[in-house]
Structures are given as C-alpha cells and as structure tokens.
Image: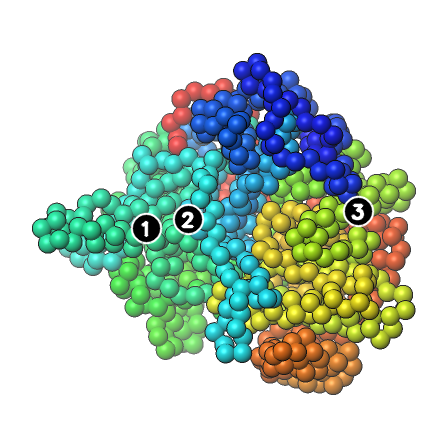
Amino acid sequence: MIGCSRKGRDQAMPFEENGQTESARAPGDVSSNMAKQVLASERKKQITIRGLGRLVGLENVPGLKLGFNRHLHFTLVKDRNVATMRDYYLALAHIVRDHLVGRWIRTQQYYYDKDPKRIYYLSLEFYIGRTLQNTMINLGIESSCDEAMYQLGLDIEELEEIEDDAGLGNGGLGRLAACFLDSMATLGLAAYGYGIRYEYGIFNQKIKDGWQAGLQRHHCPGNGVEEADDWLRHGNPWEKARPEYVLPVYFYGHVLHTKDGVKWIDAEVVLAIPYDTPVPGYLNNTVNTMRLWSAKAPNDFHLHHFNVGDYIQAVLDRNLAENISRVLYPNDNFFEGKELRLKQEYFVVAASLQDIIRRFKSSKFSCKNTRNCFDSFSDKVAIQLNDTHPALAIPELMRILVDIEKIDWDQAWTITKKTFAYTNHTILPEALERWPVGLFEKLLPRHLEIIYEINQRHLNAIRTFYPEDNQRLRRMSLIEEDGEKKINMAHLCIVGSHTVNGVAKIHSKIIKDQVFKDFSDIEPAKFQNKTNGITPRRWLLLCNPGLAALIAEKIGGDYIKDLSQLQKLHAYMNNDQFIRDLASVKQENKVKLASLLEKDYGIQINVSSMFDVHVKRIHEYKRQLMNCLYVIVMYNRIRKEPNKSFVPRTVMIGGKAAPGYYMAKLIIKLITSVAQKVNNDPIIGNKLKVIFLENYRVSLAEKVIPATDLSQQISTAGTEASGTGNMKFMLNGALTIGTMDGANVEMAEEAGEKNMFIFGMRVQDVKELDKKGYNASQYYEKIPELKEAIDQIASGYFSPNQPELFRDILNMLFHHDRFKVFADFESYISIQENVNQLYQNPIEWTKIVIKNIASSGKFSSDRAITEYARDIWGVEPKFLKIPAPTESKDT
C-alpha cells in the first residue's frame, strides 16, 4: 500500500497527547491555493496497490502517535507550545529509526551466526541525499506515518522537506555508491559501505548576478558565493556514534628495517571514530551498515607543553588532525593533488581495513582450523574500490600482512589480489590520480617502499612477456618518470586487483582497448563490464509515486524488486486509457514543479510547454554550451517570426561548477545571461523560458526528474563513462536527446534508437576527426544559425555592460575545444526538429514514453549488484529471512 499524504485537506485533525486533544500550534499552514491542491492530488488519494511487498495497514498508527509524542517530550525535551517544525521532523525521524533498530541488530546477529562472505564497498563519496522518506518506504510504514502525522495535525511532506541532504558526494560516483548500498541490502548481501563523515559536504551553490562565485579575472568580478554545506548543524538522527570502536591511523614518521622486520616509527596518530548509518533493504527486514569515519586528535598533549607554556597552542593544533574529515573535496572528474586529500584517502582505508580485519578475526569460522588465519581471508572478504580514491587500501593491506601479521610477500600479495576489485569511472586524463612521490615519502614512507616493491615485481613480470620493449615497461609502470616522479593510482589498482570493470559497455571497451590496453593485452580476463544502475525505490517509488502506482495497477507491484518486469508495459503501448493516465501523471508532476519554480525564481511557467532539462555537474565535456547555443537559436527564431507556430519550451539547466574550475563558472554566467535576455523579452512571451536551477542536489533531482519531458545527455562520444541521470529520466518517462556515449548506447539498444533522439558523432567519428584535425571555424562559417549565435555572444548582446565578458569561452570554442561542440551542432539542431514534431503529437509522444519506461528495467542497480556479486565477489544474492532478535555480536 502506498500512503498518500493529506496535504490540501481543509481541516487539520486535533493534536493528541496523553489522552488530551488540542488544536495543533500551527505546525504548518494548509494552503488554499488551487494549484497546490492539484499538485498534491496523487498523495491525497488513498491508493491501495497490491503487490508492492506486503499490504501495510494503519493498525500501528496509535503506536506511532504515542512514539512521536514521547520522542518530542523525552528525546527533544519539547512540548507542542514551543516545538518547531524541525522538532516535529526529528520526532518523526526518531520513531522511524525505532523501527530500524530491531531489524538492524537482528541482521548483524544473523551475519555473525551464519558468517557469510562480506562485501566491503570503499568509497570517498556516498551521495545519499535525504533519508526519512526512503526509510519509510523500505520499511513499508509510509502510509502509517502519513496517517499518524495527519491525525496530529501535521503534513508529512512539509516535515520531509525540513531534512537536510547528506551531500557527501559530488555527482555520479557518489550517487552510484548510495544506490548500490540500497540494492545490496535489498538483495540480502552482507555488505558494508565505508567512507568519511565529512562535516561539510558538497557546497551549497548560490547564484548572485548570474555568477556561482567570484572569479580571479579582472573582467569576471563574480559576486556569487559557494556556501559551506553545514549539513550536521542540526544533528543527524540517522547516525549512531561508535566511539568504542575508535581506531588509530598513522602519518609521517620514518621506516626502520630490523632483523625482526620492518617498523614504521615516530608517526603521528589521528583517531578514527566510526559513525554508523542503517541501510534498510526493501521490505525484507535486512538492515546493513554504512560506516563513516570522523577524524579526532588524541588527548596526549605531551606534558612538557605545560612547562613551556604551549598547552593552549597544543589544544588548538588538534584542528590539524581533525581537518581530515572536515570537508569533501568538491571536484568531479578532475584530480587536484593536495596533501589533505591524500590524508583523507589513507585515513578511510587505514581505518576501514583495521575494522574489516577485526571483524574477520572475530568471526566464528574464519580463523578456525587453518594453519594461517589469513588463508581464508579472500574467501570471506571482498573489497570493491570505487574508483582510485581508495587505492591505498592495496599497499595498506600488504603492510598489515607483511609487517604486522608476518606473512611472506608472495602469499600476502596473493591474498591482496584475490581480495580487491577496482571500478574505473573515467577516462578523462585530468581525472586520473597521480600522486607525487615526494608527498608519499613525507606522508606515508612505508607505503612508498611497498609500492616500489610492487612495481619492481610487476615490471619483472612484464619483462618475461616483452623482454626488449622498454617503452611498454615505461607505459605500464606504477611510477611515472616524466618530470616530477608520480605514482599512477589507476595502475596500482589494476595490478593489485583480480578484476577491473568499467561502468557501461562502451566505457569498458575503451578502457580495455585504449586506456589500459597494455594491461588487458596481458590479462584480458581481468577486465569486465558492469553497466551502472539506479535504485527504483528512490528513483521511482519515492520521487514519482503517481507513476509507480499507475504501473503497479497494470503489472502488479513486484517490479519494484525486479525492474525487468517493466517489459510487461509493452502490452499497454496502444492502450488509450493507459496513455491518458500516464500523460496525466506527467502533467501533475509538471504542475507541481512549476509551482515550486515560480515560488523560487518568480518566473511564470507555461505548464503546457516542453520541460527540457539538462542537469549534471558543469563541465566542458558534458557540453552545457551546446544546449545554451541552441537556446540562442530558438530565441532568434522566435524574434524573427513571432507569429509563427513554435513548440513552447521551458529549458532548465542545473549543476555545480567546481570552485576552481574557471571555464565552468563562466559557462554558468553565460547561461544565466542568456536566460535574463530570453525571460524578459516581451516578444518571446511564454514560448521560451530558461531557468538555471540553483544548488542542484539529490532532493531537487527528486522533484525535477519526474516532471521532465526531454532529457539532455549530450556529452562528446567517448567521454562520459556511463551516466546515471540518463537512466533516472528514462524510468520516469522522459525522452532522451543524446549522443551515443556512455549508457546512452545501451538505452538505445533496449528501447530502439528510433525511440530516442540520437545525434552526433560516434566514438569512431571522433577518432577520425582527431586524426584529420578539428577546425571549429569551418563549422562556424558553414552553419548560419551557429554563426549568428556566436556573433551575438562576441558582440556583447547578452552582456551589454561587459562586451568582452565571454571572450574566453569563444577562444576555447574556436581554438581549444577538446569536446568539439561545433562539430555536433548541425546534427543537434536537426534532431531538435524531430523533438518538436513529435511533441506536437502528444499521443505518439506518450507511446514512445511507454516504450522507454518498459525498456528501462536493465538499468536497475539490483541488476548491477547481482552481476557484481556473481562475477566479481563470488556470492549469490538472496532475499534473507532475518530470524528473531538475539544479542548482536557483529557490530
């Protein structure tokens, strides 16, 4: 049963506490706005959907109300006369958390008793967003909580909006990790996510005067700000601190080689304190754990500080250690080598490996009846490296096995290789991590020695295959010798792992045939593909309940745990009633988003217009510039022929630029400048609106994606590893305009290329153009509408007070454009005519939407995790039946 909130009801029910009733003290105003009531219609209805797991009734509503009031009183120390809306949210979060605790303990007890192989997902990012609604859905208590809040005079949707996003990631890599945690719990895998509990997550983007933030150029005096994301300022009801499992992590010092072995001495210690967050599976009583580490300085200030008067300074210096978990580095697809970042990377793997080994040694069976406890380590432990950020786990495990456990090198290396697997997320050279040897020597001296040893043995092995090929040895070395010596972390991951995977078929082929060809020539079986996926719980059931309900009415609700069942919708492609119902759900989502945007931006939006959306991190390879140029083309067409029929569009572009990425920030300024011109031109009217979505994040994506008609996925072929936003849009009924890049290729395979708007060069075309030489001026001269748009930008038409404002963009486009915007532009504007033509036929448009939704089942993270489990981790997913609770021994 999907619970639907009561937003928009005329009267609030009384607030009940201890048998007394009073009117609620304005917990939230109920708007009489007509549009607002239309927006909430899907959640106002009491829709019962059979098949979405078990039917969840409302029999526990009295208990939820009692628990809510108890938490308000005893946990938050408030009564209704002084409680704020945030207090109400926290009280609700605590009663939902109460429903997790028993399942959480029972799950860990089950793992201790049965001792399955455990999966450890190491990632520097977990972009989980909000937790409340997702947890209610996975526990099957959303309807009950909704009813309880309604009876208390509260609106559950307003409470959900109070929760801060846990912005512990930058983009696709971190969001993928969050989806994978959800699927691992849903599939019953004994899995753990390990990362860093950043005090400040991805920055809050504030646009001011069209700028994200000030640029260090005299002609770009940006006034915007990048505001710290202090997401923990109100506390986090979902986490549980575990100070009893605090662990030491060491830095600096030096190495001694003695007859008793190698010792790392005089190192500085930082304490790693774990904070656990429950990760519930969908309606299966499994609750796994995400463990995030927080850095803390030790308390030993050395007593001599008291005598020399440095005690105060010693206390203040604790910040140097605690800065390790202070802030998430806000770069996406760009490597920035900083000592603090390297500290973060070692901090998370050092703490996590100690924890993993502790759990392994304490298990019932792992170290029993074996000559060497670690003989069975890789049978019981699988560690997945989410990109190269946790690559130091490889030399760290070697250090533990060789230096501490006294295992000989060859056996330790065998254990290490059998334990680790590596997921590559990018082929962009600027994104690949290369750390200076000098920094390693200072920060992690023993690990540098181990990496040198790994490299020497690796190169010796290569020589046996290619004894005379020194160039190949140089290319395959873990140490790059050109200029400053650097450690290539991707090469370390490949050499130290038993499996390497890309995240879409085309990406995996590129890393095998081009980027890491030397390695795949020697070990071709090591390289696999694991196409990314998204969790249908958050990205359909949570964000688009109307569509989820409509689908369930037709094919039953089991598809939420088996998204391949969406194929059954093919039978409804020509069903008139289903077509109307699907279009109605989309329209209600559009009205709801339009209301939000009108409130936030003051722009009147035509809800009959095509919602054309391009949301992702701002980067040259994602080609927001191409989209912006087409907006200018549409603007010019309307101005020239204002009476001509025109398919109205609301173009939304959103995403954050890394604080140090000058070009990305300038692209944002161009988009906002074009929007300013378009939105205020009376000739344009409601035919075209442009909105830059400020501070795009998970919770905003949950509102934008269900309302989207056209999804822009227009990266240059061969640059986007996979993408997951493209999958979310497809599942939620948007059609895709895109290149044959990343997972777009497989989406076209599933839905049929004719059911997407595919344009532009393919990977081979890009290669051939590179060989021939890309001359942007040729396209500029050849395409009149492109020339007109570029000339307008150059003349200052969109920046009359600063005509030269965008000269660096123009210079890049003509002389340094690695991503060839002009080369694909003619194809792009041509396919846009197909988009317009189809949109004018809403029945045919909706039929293709149905085809896309029915073809999106492959892109479930459940499918992706099943493939990881079987092909990489050597475990079989299953739906667990967690037994009755007993004392937990496996925290």
Which residue carries the number 3 mark? 587
Distance, label 3 to label 1, CA atoms, is 49 Å
Distance, label 2 to label 3, CA atoms, is 39 Å
**Marks 2 and 1, the one that precedes in the sequence:** 2
> Which label was assigned to residue 322?
1
Image location of residue 370, percent across then percent down: 32, 35
Q: Secondary structure at mark 1?
A: helix
- Rendered residue at 37%/64% (across/down): 338
Image location of residue 562, percent across then percent down: 67, 38
Quarter of the picture holding the N terminus: top right
Name the amino acid, label 3.
Answer: Gln
Label 2: few (<14), some (14–19) or many (≥20) C-alpha neighbours in 10 Å: some
Q: How many marks?
A: 3
**Compared with residue 31, is residue 198 higher up or lower down, i.e. above or below?**
below
Foreground of the two, 725 or 257:
725
Q: Quadrant of residue 388?
A: bottom left
> Which label was assigned to residue 199?
2
Quarter of the picture holding the C terminus: top left
- Rendered residue at 59%/29% (across/down): 25
**Marks 2 and 3, the one that precedes in the sequence:** 2
**Marks 3 and 1, the one that precedes in the sequence:** 1
Q: Are marks 2 and 3 in contact (CB under 8 Å)?
A: no
- Rendered residue at 44%/58% (across/down): 329
Question: Would residue 477 be found to the left or right of residue 305 on screen?
Answer: right
